[in-house]
């Protein structure tokens, strides 16, 4: 990894090589989204978020492109591990129950996202509620002190939880963890929450607009001005005696690599922050999948024609799953037409505000990021306080958010964060 800090430094320009050129495991399990889901689950195993054998046994019989089979397999695994968790809880085995609830929640979370390729979304809410029941089971059995938070938001509230490393009310450094675009609340447990607790931090997790229960149960979409989401979190936490106001930190994963820097451009009360990995322009991550001719039609402002041509393109053989996934990905933005989707994501751009960030920001940049390649380095170049942190394939730290290198990620980002806040102790 190469790191450099300050607006005048030269950002590491190592190439984003293909993600398979130096791997022992070269082929992956499947193509595209399924393979990434498997990698992400396997990466959670070191923190108890999955069991490797369970994952491999589940995927072994599933044929490529069997979307119904993919969904059904993850629900079945979730059901099986949920039964294990419930049995352990009834017999008073709290540690076993908590760990099984966490795994079951993550397996159901894969099934929730798998709904994107099903013929209809009737299974979405029931599957999400199974996932949420497992999260509730985890909260009831974990040995970490945890408290529900109702975070004020536009006349209502956002759901959140604060975990503490022990039962004392001592003021501590506190890490707020921001979900990505489609991540379940349990996902961040293995992406830094447990690691932060072990290092003496309080940990706050929450669901914001467009995320999980806020979207599935309340229909509240994403918003680009994420400072309107994060500032109420800060206000609530700084009123608590167990939060050290001088050592408040922020972490964002995946598309929260946009939301976190956006919030930091306007909310300056954080001592340190992490973008895992960095995002400047969400529009580019959508545009890269659209044929050049069609995209040119949209960018010339011919939106009605663009919508018609996209609809025709999605009627071609082999494109139905792509159409379903577009619709699923558009839903959190509160839009339906193809051009409206691109209009919406075009609002998520940091270029004009990134220079306002004064909080030290650790920007993670992994080889082979399949969604935001090149954008972490770009973000680091725009933020005067940024540390550009390269993660490489040679280290086993490739792909978006380096899913198979979470221990390495945790070590580096917390070593950096600890050093940022140590002077404030």
Image: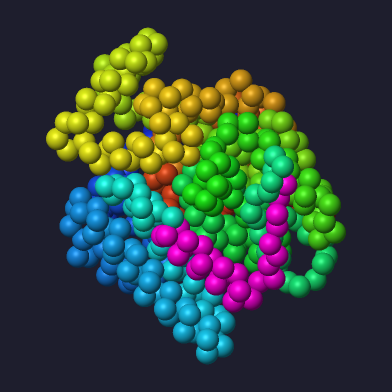
Relative depth, front residue between 109 and 1 = 109
Q: Is residue 364 visible?
A: no
> Does 238 appear in magenta?
no
Query: Compared with residue 80, is residue 124 higher up or lower down, i.e. above or below?
Result: above
Q: How is the image coloured?
A: rainbow
- Residue 296 percent location from the top left of the image: 32, 14
Which residue is outermost to the bottom? Answer: 91
Q: Residue at x 66, y 43 (%)?
A: 273
Taking the image as shown, residue 177 lies to the left or right of residue 201, namely left
Relative depth, front residue between 326 and 239 = 326
Q: Residue at x 21, y 61 (%)?
A: 62
Q: Residue at x 69, y 71 (%)?
A: 145
Q: Is residue 310 visible?
A: yes
Query: Compared with residue 176, is residue 262 higher up or lower down, i.e. above or below?
Result: above
Query: Compared with residue 52, is residue 191 higher up or lower down, i.e. above or below?
Result: above
> Does 150 appear in magenta?
yes
Q: Which residues are magenta?
A: 126-152
Taking the image as shown, residue 361 lies to the left or right of residue 187, namely right
Number of numbered tags placed on the structure image: 0
Taking the image as shown, residue 285 lies to the left or right of residue 229, namely left
Q: Which image quarter: residue 194?
A: bottom right
- Residue 144 percent location from the top left of the image: 66, 71
- Residue 17 percent location from the top left of the image: 34, 37
Q: Residue at x 49, y 84 (%)?
A: 88
Relative depth, front residue between 130 and 40 = 130
Relative depth, front residue between 209 and 57 = 209
């Amino acid at each position: 990894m190469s790191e450099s800090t300050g607006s005048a430094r030269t950002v590491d320009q190592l190439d984003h090589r293909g993600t398979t050129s130096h791997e022992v495991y070269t082929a992956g399990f499947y193509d595209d989204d399924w393979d990434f889901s498997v990698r992400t689950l396997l990466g959670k195993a070191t923190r108890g978020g999955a069991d490797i054998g369970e994952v491999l046994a589940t995927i072994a019989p599933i044929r490529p492109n069997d979307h119904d089979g993919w969904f059904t397999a993850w629900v079945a695994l979730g059901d099986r591990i949920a039964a294990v968790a419930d049995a352990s809880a009834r017999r008073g085995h709290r540690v076993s129950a908590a760990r099984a609830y966490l795994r079951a929640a993550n397996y159901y979370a894969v099934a929730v996202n798998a709904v994107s390729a099903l013929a209809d979304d009737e299974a979405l809410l029931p599957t999400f509620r199974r996932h949420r029941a497992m999260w509730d089971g985890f909260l009831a059995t974990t040995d970490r002190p945890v408290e529900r938070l109702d975070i004020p938001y536009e006349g209502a509230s956002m759901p959140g939880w604060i975990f503490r490393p022990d039962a004392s009310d001592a003021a501590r450094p506190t890490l707020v963890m921001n979900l990505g675009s489609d991540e379940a609340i349990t996902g961040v447990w293995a992406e830094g929450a447990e690691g932060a607790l072990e290092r003496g931090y309080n940990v706050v997790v929450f669901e914001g607009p467009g995320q999980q229960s806020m979207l599935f149960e309340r229909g509240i979409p994403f918003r680009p001005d994420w400072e309107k989401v994060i500032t109420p979190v800060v206000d609530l936490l700084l009123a608590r005696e167990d939060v050290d106001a001088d050592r408040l930190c922020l972490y964002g994963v995946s598309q929260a690599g946009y939301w976190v820097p956006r919030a930091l451009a306007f909310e300056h009360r954080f001592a340190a922050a992490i973008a895992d990995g960095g995002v400047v322009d969400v529009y580019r991550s959508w545009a890269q999948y659209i044929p050049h001719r069609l995209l040119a039609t949209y960018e010339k402002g011919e939106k009605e024609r663009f919508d018609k041509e996209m609809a025709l393109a999605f009627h071609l053989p082999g494109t139905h799953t792509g159409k379903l996934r577009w619709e699923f990905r558009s839903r959190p933005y509160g839009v339906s037409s193809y051009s409206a989707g691109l209009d919406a994501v075009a609002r998520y751009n940091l270029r004009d505000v990134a220079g306002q960030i004064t909080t030290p920001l650790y920007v993670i940049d992994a080889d082979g990021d399949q969604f935001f390649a090149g954008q972490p380095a770009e973000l680091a170049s725009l933020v005067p306080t940024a540390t550009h942190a390269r993660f490489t394939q040679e280290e086993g730290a490739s792909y978006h958010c380096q899913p198979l290198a979470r221990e390495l990620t945790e070590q580096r980002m917390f070593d950096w964060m600890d050093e940022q806040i140590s002077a404030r102790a």
